[in-house]
Image (tube, coloured by chain):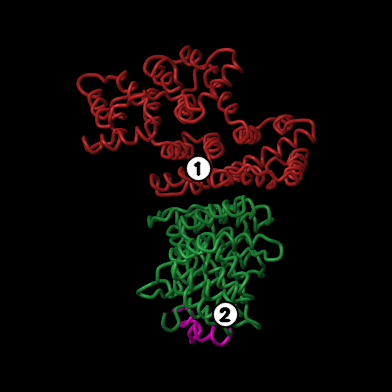
Chain colours: A green, B red
């Protein structure tokens, strides 16, 4: 469930566009006005505002926001205002660049979006970067990471609920054998994780747990840890319990010495319209404090207000 | 250019559907009537006929055709009548089955369709088989073949004409190094062939030719031959000169001792609405005889008539 709060009666897009334009005028910017509008409009409404704004002012709203805002608040507003597929394409592209490279972001986008949404990301990537997503991922990764990430971002998983129990059993056995042999990047592990439907994978991992007495991630933790093993466990978490994956990411990004705004902004802007309510529940349960309170304690100013608005804090 | 000939004035779909229904009635089937209708309707028209037929007779036209027809003629009519994406999904599925398995068919579908058409095949595969195409390909292949085929069928290549010349040079060098080392299934060769746009790949292979004095396929022929090398060369041919690939496939399927109707039917039904005119040109140039004449010499009866109609022989 989404945390985004859209008021019962939304002004027509040209009014929103005018208000935003006013917020940029004169000395200083009216950040409160920007938040009160953009943080309370859904993707379709934000797209319309961008269109109308461009027609009225001959300028992309995102360009003007970029000019007027700065630092963490700017990144939050820009990411949020983008269309979801465009936003994911942007984040994925950033994740292939040297200074901002992140295998985790690529995995997260590939594993927590629906098959159709992931395909829309690949289309948006073509349009924006004149290249394919898998092309950049393959070019900028190597070794085991490439072996895992390229099929993950190229997948178009079946999304039906059908489960083949025989197959679940045989593939649980394969996974267990390979893990027992410490062959973590074996092509059979990669094949199963990158091609099976989430329902089928879930059945396989449940059977793994039943047959071998431990969850797969527990077994994957028994060896000396390394970055590939961490990514593999996160992949499994994203495919089976995305809300737990996001809860942990939020927890670590808030609790660490110096907040990780990069991750915090990404999770809030990408999940507010999807499953942030579930993530908040999970967060409360795991930390005995609400996400609202932790975000308020760790951030400040317009950035804080923007994040709180997106996670549905207070009244719309 | 398509070879399919659609008459200037096409009867409404319910009339075509009625005529087809009549062709099935009584003792024996009127094959001529079936050819005169179906072999002269484009994909959208055939879809409409199927819809109208199902509404009027409570039965899928394909089921009735299956009941009435037999052997090579049946396969040609059924494949042709299917919607292109559905047909490719069917052929790809067949190519993953034990008795009809074919790495070539999978490669051919992955490399000669446009990116969007390949994605439509993947959607049709979900709908028809309740699984994903890459899932079945990964499951039913092993080793080097899997390494090549899974990314090929999962690709969503960029289709713009932009070319990065620096990249073409550096990747031509990589390809040449790996081939000189006989590392034919090296992950860099796979990466370049499976992710780059066709325009970029073309530039890379042109540079290969200029810099190293031989075409890549010539170099790939210098070693003792094996099935993987053959598939690799065919992949390169499909990505750069699809009409030459299809010409050769037709030539071999006709010239071999006993015609290979399986391949002949596939090429004719999948290319008639796409680029069969170019393939016929290529065939004539390479064999000094027209494709029409060779097909007429090597096939007979309704099957011959069906193929000739699809390649645009005589009047519509």
Give the number of the disc on residue A303: 2
Reply above or below: A147 against B238.
Answer: below
Q: Position of residue B254 (x, y in %)?
A: 52, 18
Range shown magenta = A278-299
- Residue B145 place in picture, x, y as percent: 60, 41
The residue carrying pointer 1 sits among few (fewer than 14), some (14 to 19) or many (20 or more) residues within 10 Å by Cα, namely many
In the image, residue B49 sits, relative to residue B5, either above or below, namely below
Query: Does the magenta stretch mainly form a helix, a strand or a loop?
Result: helix
Q: Are marks 1 and 2 on the same chain?
A: no
The crowd level at tag 2 (other Cα within 10 Å; few <14, some 14-19, many 20+) is many
Q: Is residue B97 left or right of residue A75?
A: left
Can residue A278 be seen?
Answer: no
Helix, strand or loop at mark 2: helix
Tag of residue A160: none
Camera-side residue of B247 and B227: B247
Q: Are marks 1 and 2 in contact (CB under 8 Å)?
A: no
Residue at image coords 64%, 40%: B199
Helix, strand or loop for disc 1: helix
- Image location of residue B26, percent across then percent down: 19, 21
Outermost residue to the left:
B26
Q: CA distance from mark 1 to mark 2?
A: 43 Å
Report the side of B110 relative to B89 (left or right).
right
Q: Which residue is mark 1?
A: B118
Residue B300 to residue A241: above or below: above
Quarter of the image containing the C terminus of chain B?
Answer: top left
Decide which of A67, A124 is in the foreground and name it: A67
Left or right of A127? Residue A96 is: right
Q: Residue at horizontal 66%, vertical 83%?
A: A257
| Closer-to-camera residue (B252/A64) | A64
């Amino acid at each position: 469930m989404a945390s985004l709060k859209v008021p019962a009666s939304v002004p027509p897009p040209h009014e929103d566009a005018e208000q935003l334009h006013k917020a940029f005028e004169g000395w200083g910017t009216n950040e409160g006005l920007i938040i009160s509008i953009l943080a309370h409009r859904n993707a379709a409404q934000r797209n319309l505002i961008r269109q109308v704004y461009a027609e009225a002012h001959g300028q992309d709203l995102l360009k003007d926001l970029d000019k007027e805002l700065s630092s963490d608040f700017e990144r939050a507003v820009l990411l949020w205002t983008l269309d979801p597929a465009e936003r994911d394409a942007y984040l994925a592209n950033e994740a292939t660049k040297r200074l901002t490279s992140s295998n985790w972001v690529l995995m997260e986008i590939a594993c927590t979006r629906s098959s159709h949404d992931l395909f829309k990301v690949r289309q948006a990537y073509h349009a924006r970067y004149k290249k394919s997503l898998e092309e950049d991922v393959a070019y900028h990764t190597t070794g085991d990471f490439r072996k895992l990430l390229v099929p993950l971002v190229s997948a178009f998983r079946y999304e039906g609920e059908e489960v083949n129990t025989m197959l679940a059993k045989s593939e649980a056995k394969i996974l267990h054998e390979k893990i027992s042999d410490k062959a973590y990047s074996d092509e059979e592990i990669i094949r199963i994780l990158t091609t099976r439907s989430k329902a089928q994978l879930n059945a396989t991992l449940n059977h793994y747990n039943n047959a071998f007495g431990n969850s797969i991630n527990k077994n994957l933790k028994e060896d000396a840890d390394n970055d590939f093993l961490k990514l593999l466990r996160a992949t499994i978490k994203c495919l089976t319990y995305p809300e737990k994956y996001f809860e942990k990411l939020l927890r670590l990004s808030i609790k660490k010495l110096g907040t990780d705004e990069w991750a915090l902004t990404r999770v809030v802007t990408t999940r507010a319209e999807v499953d942030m309510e579930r993530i908040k529940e999970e967060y409360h349960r795991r930390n005995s404090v609400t996400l609202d309170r932790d975000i308020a304690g760790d951030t400040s100013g317009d950035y804080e207000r923007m994040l709180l608005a997106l996670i549905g804090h207070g009244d719309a």
